[in-house]
Image (cartoon, rainbow, N blue to C red):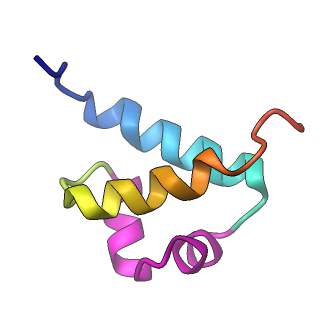
Amino acid sequence: MKKPCNKEQVRFDVRSARIELGMTQKQLADACGLSLRTFCSLENGSKVSNSTEKKLSNYLQNQDLSKT
């Protein structure tokens, strides 16, 4: 059984990853193939579709977030 997500933790994790990459919301949204509105919803902890989560996850998995 999947553990429920803490909305605040998801918001923090997405924002932290974006800042670590040195990207704006628009830049990361574009890189993931998301609209800015959808990305902002995700970063604010709103419920988004599985495909949106997958797009962000796929992009972040290919980034080196340990550089900084």
The residue depicted at 61 percent of the width and 42 percent of the height is 16
What's the residue at 41%, 43% (across, down)? 11
Q: Looking at the image, which is closer to me, 64 or 14?
A: 64
> Residue at horizontal 41%, vertical 68%?
39
For the image, the number of numbered tags is 0
Residue at image point 57% right, 58% down? 59
Kindly indicate the quadrant of the structure image that contains residue 50.
bottom left
Locate the C terminus and report the quarter of the image it occupies. Answer: top right
Whole-percent x, y for residue 2 in the image: 16, 22
Residue 1 on the magenta span:
no
Residue 49: which quarter of the image?
A: bottom left
Up/down of 59 relative to 65, above or below: below
Magenta residue check for 41: yes
Point out residue 57 in the picture as x, y percentages from the top left corner: 47, 50
**Residue 23 or residue 49, whichever sits in front:** 49
Considering the image in quadrants, where does the N terminus appear?
Answer: top left
Q: Is residue 57 left or right of residue 17?
A: left
Q: Quick check: 11 above or below 55?
A: above
Horizontal arrangement in the rendering, residue 64 relative to residue 45 (left or right): right
**What secondary structure prevails in the magenta region?**
helix
Q: Position of residue 31 (x, y in %)?
A: 60, 74
Q: Position of residue 30 (x, y in %)?
A: 56, 80
Range shown magenta: 24-44
